[in-house]
Image (cartoon, rainbow, N blue to C red):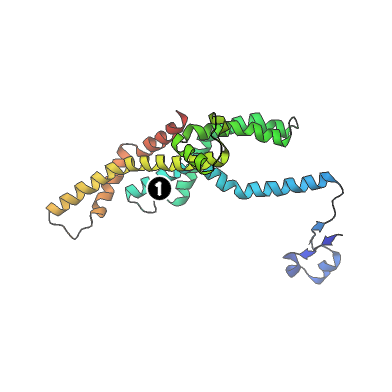
Amino acid sequence: MRLRLSTAVCLFLLASPASAQEGVIPALRFGLERARGPQDVALTLQIVFLLTVLTLAPAILLLLTSFTRIVVVLSFLRNALGTQAMPPNQVVVGLALFLTFFIMAPTWTAVYGDALRPYLDGQIPQDRAIQLARPPVQKFLLAHAREKDIALFVKLSKAPRPRNPQEVPFAALVPAFVISELRTAFSIGFLVYIPFVIIDIVVASVLMSMGMFMLPPMMVSLPFKLIFFVLVDGWHLVVGSLARSFLT
């Protein structure tokens, strides 16, 4: 059984009757037919799997890479400066993405060389490629997940206690990595806040001693925080510390 859907796009509204008779209006057809063998079914399943992976790509990026820690720390930094929407969210997320690509390059290179490239060359099957792609990702997650958090999710899942780190199930490792990253990001955010809070306190104390109660302290402290951040080369320090926290 074959189902066909013929549609005329915007040219139908713009084309003249003469051009329509000449058949210049494009037609778009979609067809569904019975599978002629197991290969057709396998190809269909691969397409569905690929679309599913593309749909889940943002979640994979957030949960299995350094993106979470970086974007949280950069958001804390922006709030500590008191600049509200500066830099914009697009800049913060874009910087976090490129830092993620830089930090995750060794892991992704190992996955490509060990699993993806041999699979694309037809040297190994798909299930073997998935097995070979797991160790580099698992190594990264284990390096930055706390044992306490891993033990929590292993206990909650009621799974057997792993005899070595390689036996930790992904279902427990991924959430443990995420909450470990959040804890580290909040710790870094606390350290980022301290110098700017001190500037706010000093400015507020000076304004109160001068009797300028009606002047908002944030309006006066913002230029001092900006010049302080520029003089100490704050972006270099923050980004360098974030990168070193993963690469060391």
Residue 114 vertical position relative to residue 196 in the rendered view, above or below: above
Image point (64%, 46%), residue name: 53
Residue 71, quarter of picture: top left
Q: Return the residue found at the far bottom.
A: 17
Q: Where is residue 37 in the image (x, y as percent from the top left)?
A: 86, 46
209 or 63: nearer the viewer: 63
Q: Mark 1 highlights which residue?
A: 75
Does residue 104 lie above or below 220 as drawn?
Answer: above
Quarter of image, res 24: bottom right
Q: Can residue 98 be seen in this view?
A: no
- Of the 4 image quadrants, the one containing the C terminus is top left
Taking 194 as reference, is 7 above or below it? below
The image quadrant where one finds the N terminus is bottom right
At x 21% / y 48%, what residue is drawn? 201
Amino acid type indicated by mark 1: Ser
Name the one closer to the observer, 17 or 231. 231
Can you tell which quarter of the image residue 157 is in?
A: top right
Q: Is residue 215 visible?
A: yes
- Secondary structure beneath label 1: helix
- Residue nearer the viewer, 30 or 42: 42
Please give left or right for residue 115 compared with residue 75 in the image. Answer: right
Q: Residue at 16% x, 53% y: name it.
A: 207
- Residue 62 coordinates in the image, percent (x, y): 52, 45
Q: What is the total number of numbered labels drawn onto the structure image?
A: 1
Q: Position of residue 227 (x, y in %)?
A: 29, 43
Disc 1 crowd, CA 10 A, few/some/many (<14, 14-19, 20+): some
Q: Looking at the picture, how far across and down is residue 237, in whole percent?
A: 37, 35
Task: Kindly identify the residue that appears in the image at 52 percent across and 39 percent down.
Answer: 154
